[in-house]
Amino acid sequence: MDAGKSLARLVSLGDRNGMKALMLHNACDLGPIRSVTAEVHATDVGCEARFRLDGGVDRIKVPEAAPSIRTDDLWKTTCFEIFWQPIGGTYYREFNLSPSGRWAAYDFDGFREGMRDAPVDAISLSVAHGSSDGAGELELVANIASDLPTPAQVALNAIVEHADGSLQFWALAFPPGKPEFHSEACRQWVLDRA
């Protein structure tokens, strides 16, 4: 198959049903997760997002179910992230969404500047997963009620912790160098309310 047909096939697979394929950062080792896809839609009260890991979910660290409360440092193990930046501004909001049911939300005035807890009316997370013999999936759906102005540039990211404690970083795009989810280069999904 020539490169053009191969790329077209990859794009069509990654964008089916609104899901977009995330890329693995080039500094990360390939592990049991073979693909990560995600999607986000603006709603009247905020947004709804869906993330999906495909592969050996039984061979990664998945946080155990816990009360759905605001919790810091979720990014230190398997979790999903949304960065939401209104177009034309430097302000952005970050959401960390754990398969445990815990979450975090932060506001920033600019690149890693002025970090503070973001106001959130409600976050509902639902998670389903199953895997055996290296085949399976984990899906997280988040319904977020929070002031999220549009149009906006949005980043969808995933962090996957392997059994040995090493981390993989997945995103729509990365800036050059180390994986930096706070970079505007990661915010590749432009979104508005219909």
Image (tube, rainbow, N blue to C red):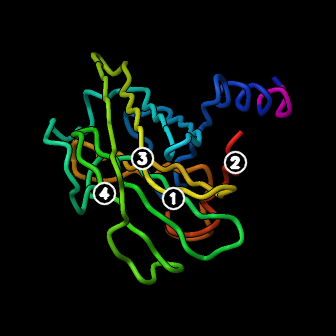
In primary-sequence order, the first of circles 3 and 2 is: 3
Above or below, 121 against 54 in this view is below
Q: CA distance from mark 1 to mark 4?
A: 12 Å
Give 191 or 172, whichever is nearer the viewer: 191
> Are the residues tagged 1 and 3 within 8 Å (C-beta)?
no
Q: Which residue is mark 2?
A: 192
Q: Which residue is mark 3?
A: 145
In primary-sequence order, the first of circles 4 and 3 is: 4
Identity, as a three-letter code, of the amino acid under mark 4:
Ala
In primary-sequence order, the first of circles 2 and 4 is: 4
Write down the region rendered in magenta. Answer: 2-6
Q: CA distance from mark 2 to mark 1?
A: 15 Å
User: Looking at the image, is mark 1 or mark 3 nearer the viewer?
Assistant: 3
What is the number of the mark on residue 83?
Answer: 1
Q: Is residue 3 magenta?
A: yes
Q: Neighbour class for label 3 at 10 Å: few (<14), some, many (≥20)?
A: some
Identity, as a three-letter code, of the amino acid under mark 2:
Asp
Query: What residue sits 69% from the left and 48% below the top?
Result: 192
In primary-sequence order, the first of circles 1 and 4 is: 1
Q: CA distance from mark 3 to mark 2?
A: 16 Å
Q: Which residue is mark 4?
A: 104
